Structure formats: structure tokens, C-alpha cells
Amino acid sequence: MKRAAAIWCITALLATATQAQTKRPAQTEKAKMDAYINGLMAKMTVDEKIGQLNLVTGGEATTGAAVSTDVEGKIRKGQVGGIFSLTTPGRIRKAQEIAVNGSRLHIPMLFGQDVIHGYKTSFPIPLALAASWDMPMIEHTARVAATEASADGINWTFSPMVDIARDPRWGRVAEGSGEDPYLGSAIARVMVKGYQGDDLKKANTIMACVKHFALYGAAEAGRDYNTTDMSPNRMYNEYLPPYKAAVDAGAGSIMASFNDINGTPATANKWLLTDVLRKQWGFNGFVVSDYTGVSEMIEHGLGNLQQVSGLALKAGMNMDMVSEGFLTTLKKSLAEKKVSLADIDAACRLILQAKYKLGLFDDPYKYCSEERAKTEILTPAHLKFSREAASQTFVLLKNDNKTLPLKKAGTIALIGPLGNSRANMPGTWAVNADLGNTPSLLEGLKAVAGDKANIVYNMGSNLLDDATEQKNGTMFGREIPRDARSEQDMIIDAVRTAEKADVVVAALGESSEMSGESSSRSNIQIPAIQQRLLAALLKTGKPVVLVLFTGRPLAIKWESENVPAILNVWFGGTQAAYAIADVLFGDVNPSGKLPITFPQNVGQVPIYYSHKNTGRPLPDGKWFTKFRSNYLDVSNDPLYPFGFGLSYTNFNYGGVTLSSGTLKNGGTITASVTVTNTGDREGKETVQLYTRDMVGSISRPVKELKGFQKISLKPGESKGVKFTISVNDLKFYNADLKYVAEPGEFKVFIGPNSRDVKESHFTLLDR
Ligand code: BGC
């Protein structure tokens, strides 16, 4: 550290002395950085430069077969640019000391981690956070995550995951913000801001890594890591915007995706990593591969390790996660003139810049405070916020006869394999959560009901019929012990428990590892064994509330027709159990809205609100019409549309008023609506604005989200909600990929979800 700091001071002084006082501060800062890095790179051997491009694992948590070996030896030799999955100030300090004191040039390392939805205080999974539509709240979850992670030694997170996903078979829908580019972009921006704050040099901010660039969410058939093939039009208008939003928000790094895109894996896709990312978007951070993304190109069929490593580097890949293809082959490729020194230098410079921006050359141990680790992690304030945040993400899908909220009285039977599992509460990718100390739903209900209600639990069924399938869906410490009794015996027992109760809360759905990475499903229903349990519970005639745990949209048509109340709770983080109880008992009024469409069945997939009209659209309200775009066996309607979610109160929407019937280029118009709380309790409502471009040079979606506002209304209260629409909001990428707004008629829709809207229209003028 001393040496590094000394070099920094001298170079900084020199740089300052030679700079004209008149330069803008940003330029001065950039010039200082360049001078420092130029000085450092002048001393580096090719091996040391290549070493900076190597990212190794330091912990146990891995997502592939390969693990890094001889990490300490490599650090000493200057062969490691960063480590991930190593935590705690003590361990990180030790590793950093080896780099700073033990390697020739004393270059500090980056310490990365998958801090995806919170750190030790975990928050709802990203898909759930998106359901809150609450940007300040989402930003604050990232802020808290950064505070805790940086207090534990981490300075770089592999988040936000901004992949648009419209196929719920893909397990990783859980990790993103759903189907919509507008909502996804808004979330991408606030996540980056939450992690990076206003100054990356602060000790409580960490560098974001936007992933997975790009189109990972469009994997064919929803099978993880599968091929994607997409038109430029769809890419630019629907899938790329959230990555761009994160880049524009200043994300310091980006992770390439595993998939191939129109024939070239993203990891070596020059068009993607250089032409789009650098040239079109002006990205100035660094690009890291995903876990063994470089060596996996051997399996993609692109050549041997040396060939694929060269391809990746030349395409614009800067850091190789775990493959060690860069480390072991680039020098040879350089000698053989297959890559150039300029390619290696460019990548090395970007890694060093990241370290500089984080302030690691000033103080490589700035994230290694034992004191902070003791006082800033799992604080009462963080836990309180986690509980509040979780309660904002639940989506009330159905509530007949005011089944919810429950009274804190009588006997409540909690039944189902997910009702008493602590480990399944935080959700997939909660790698730092203390699974053993996360209250189960049973514990949460008991804590919130206190002695007012008698809560009894019965497991009712196993998670899945098949034991092996259950094992595969409950990895990483998320086991749900299997009950050895027969299904029949378990149901009889559960029914007995239900019969003695006033109301049944059925905690069913997926375990947390049934979504997430490499957890694709071809059947997206509640597992059959649980459905049979649910049917038996309904037969008792007791009111049944389905508390649905899921990391993806599930096809719950039968449940939606037969269960009186359904609360979709996703996976809500450390405090989920209390938050679910808060909502079930009505201490909090649910306000979540779906960030992704729920299909009627898997055959409708991909189904999303922002589809094209086709030349043969189905007339509204119809199911099947011959020679129209539809199915014989199911209507085109989703089960629950994008943006949908109920409340314990009701909201009434007035008509849409526009400030003008025409919009001039450069001008704006205002769309207004009055929303009234017509029920008897206070509630929050996310008012959504959509537009439709009626005539375009290319076909345009039937609706596109263009704005939303989350408001709170007291019983009887009305609020006027105004949205400003500017020409920019109407722009799209045309057939030449030019970003344009085309004059003509536009429809404006406002409503509580993408289906139940009121509409008006205006004309965009030529000038
Ligand atoms: C995942 C990434 C993750 C990385 C490191 C990969 O398998 O796709 O999202 O950041 O592992 O853990």
C-alpha cells in the first residue's frame, strides 16, 4: 500500500503541475488518472498486464465446474486483477496485503461478489422489487446493499441484472425486472445510483456491474444459457434499453452474457462489445466475462482456449472470469501476432482505471474496516427497511369476499411445504443471507399475531413428487426435508388441521432454488403434489388464502378459478416472514403490481403486453375466430396482465384529459387523470401511462409503458395525476436503427394495469 500510495502522490503532483489551471475539473481528474496509469503501465511487463485481466474465485461459492487454484501464488506473481466471492475485512485485507506487499508493482485487487438483492440484510428478489414500482425504495435497497457489502470488504458487485425476460420458463426471470424496457431501464438507473452513489471513492460505495450483456433473457425455449437470435429492431427497441440506461447512469463495469447472439457468443462479440457498447454508447468502464464465459467458447465450437481467448480480447473483452484463458494464452498469441500489445494495453488500462476510480491506489484497504463490519451490517434500521420493502412487493392477485385481510383472532392453519422453511425465505442468489436465522412464515405469523390468534402448522405435502427433482430444486442449503409418509397420509393429516381452523393459509409454490440460475422449468405450474393438497384443503369448505412463493410467473389458472384469495409473495428477503404477516393481517395494504405477465398456460409463452398487433388481430373479447391470430384451446388473454395488482381498497379512474390534441416537435403535452380511493382504507396505487403509435414506418407495439406514478390515497381521497409527454417519449429505433419520433396519431392510455385502461389520443405534428 505504501509503495502504491507513494507512486500515486508523486505522479499526481506531477500531473497537477503540468495541467493548465483553466481546465474543467472533470478533465483535470481524467488527466490525473491518465497520468497515474500511464506511469504505472510504463513499468509493467506484458505478464503483469495480462495478470490484471484475470479474475479468480476466492470463496466456495461457484456457479460452474471450474474453480481457481493457487490463488495466493498467482497474486504474488501479479497474475490476479481481482477476486470474487471472498468476504470479511480480515480475509480481504490478507489477500490485498499479498497483492500490495507481495507482488512486484503492489497493484491492489478488486473484490467482487454477487450482491444481488441485498447483502446480509437481504431484500426481495429483483423481480419482486420491480413489482413495487417504487424507484426511491429500490435505489435504497441498493444503497443498503452497498453499505453492508463495502463494510464487509467488497468493492464491486455483479449487479444489476437488467435482462429483459418474457419467458417464465427461464429461471433467471427471478433476477431481473421483468418484461418491460421502460420499467427495466428506470430500475437499472436507480440500482446503479444506489450502489455507486455520487462518488465511487467513498468507502461505502461499490462499483456496479451491469449484466448480462446482452439478450440473455431471450434464451430459446427458456432454457438457461441457450442461444438467442433476434432482429435488430427488437433488440434496440425492447432488449437493449435497460443496459444502455445503466451505462448512461455511469455503471463502472458490464458483464458479457453466456449466450450466443445471432451466431457469435456475447463473450467474443465485437459488434456488441465494441461497436454498440463503446462506439454507439460511449461506455468507458470495463467488460468482464461471465463465469468461464471465455473457455466455454470451446464448447460453442469457436476453437481452442488460445483461439477463443484471442477472439474475446479482440472483440472487447477486458477481464476473464475463472477461465484463465487470458492468463495462459495471450502472451503466446502476442508472440504469434494473433493479438496486439495495444489490445492487451487497452484492457489493462480499463481495469486499472476501475481501481483508480474506486480509490484503491489511494488506500487499498479502504473497505477493510472491522469496525464497520461490526456496526453497519444487519442493523436494526436495515432490517426494518427490509421488512417495509418486502411488504411493498407482494401482489394481491385475487381477493374474493374480502377473504383478506385476516383477523388476528381464532385459529389459523398454515399448511404447505413452504410454510416453515427458514432457508427458502430470502430467495435465490441471497449468497450472504444467514439462512438459518431468517424467520420462516410460521415464525413471522406467530410474531405478528402475538397471542391474539392461534397459529398451527402442518406441512401437508412434500415440495415435489419426485425426490431427485426436489433435491435439484433445493440446492445451496435450501433443503426442505422430505416427509416419509405417503401423500395420502399427509393430506389426511393436513385436512384434519384445516378442519379445526377458522381459515387456512396455504404456503405453496416454488422453493427459492426452483428459479434462478440453471433452474429452468418446462412446466410452470405449482407442483402437482401441492395442487392436490390445495384441492383437498378447498374441499374442507374453509376459506383458503394461497400465499404463493415463486421466482417466476406461474400458470395458476386453476388456482385463480378456485381459491378465493391469492397473495403472490415471490421471495422477500431476510424479513419476508414478518412482511407477509403484515400484509395478511392488514397492517400493510398490498400495493405490488406485476412487472411481468402471468400466462394462462405455458403454451402462451412468450406472452407480454407490448406485443404487435399482427395483420389478423383477434377482435376484443373474442376467444377463437378462424383465420385470426389465436389458439384453438386457450384465449389470447393473459391470466394476469402486466401491471396488475389489487389492494384491500378500491381505486376509481376518471377519464384521460390531454392538455392539447396536438404535440409540436420540441413541445410537451400533459395527460391527466383523477384517481379516487373509493374503499375504506388507505392504499397505494401505481398509476400507469401507456402510448400507442398508430401509424409507423415499421409496425409498432399495441401499448408501451411511458410513465408511472405511485401515489397514496386516504379513503375517499382523490388525486389528479399528471404525466408530461414529450417527443422523446415517442421515439423508437426505425428500420435503419435511427432513433426517431414519427408524426401522426398516438393513443394515450392510463390505468391501474396494462389492460384496464382509459384512453385518449393526440397528433404529433411535423414540426
Ligand atoms: C452468473 C453470473 C454471476 C457469476 C459469478 C455466473 O454463473 O451467470 O450472474 O455473476 O456466475 O458468480
Image (cartoon, rainbow, N blue to C red):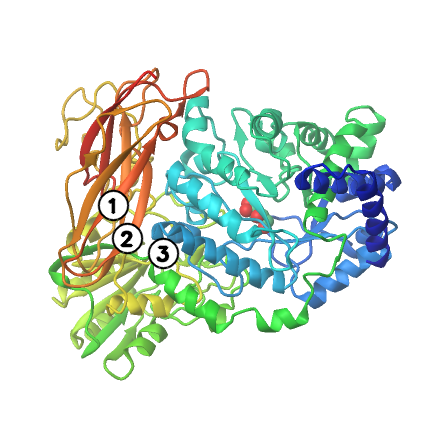
Residue 759 at x, y percent in the picture: 18, 33
Residue 721, numbered circle: 1
The amino acid at mark 3 is Trp
Q: Residue furthest front?
A: 22
649 relative position to 304: left or right? left
Q: Quadrant of the N terminus?
A: bottom right
Which numbered disc, 1 or 2, marks the residue that appears first in the sequence?
2
Q: Is mark 3 within 8 Å of ligand 1?
A: no
**Label 2, residues with CA under 10 Å away: few <14, some 14-19, many ≥20:** some
Q: Residue at x 34, y 56 (%)?
A: 393
Indicate which disc residue 570 carries: 3
Q: Secondary structure at mark 2?
A: strand
Give SS at disc 3.
Answer: loop
> What is the x, y in percent for residue 38?
81, 38
Could you say which quadrant of the image residue 534 lies in?
bottom left
Closer mark to the observer between disc 1 and disc 3: 1
Callout 3 touching callout 2 (CB < 8 Å): no
Q: Earlier in the sequence, mark 1 or mark 3?
A: 3
Residue 75, percent from left and from top: 80, 53
The residue shown at (39%, 38%) is 182
Is any part of residue 63 visible from this angle? no
Query: Mark 2 is on which residue type?
Result: Ile
Q: Earlier in the sequence, mark 3 or mark 2?
A: 3
Q: Nearer the viewer, residue 636 or 748?
A: 748
Tell me the CA gap for discs 3 and 2: 23 Å
Q: Which mark is residue 701?
A: none
Q: Are marks 1 and 2 in contact (CB under 8 Å)?
A: yes
Q: Which quarter shows the C terminus? A: top left
Identify the residue under disc 2: 711
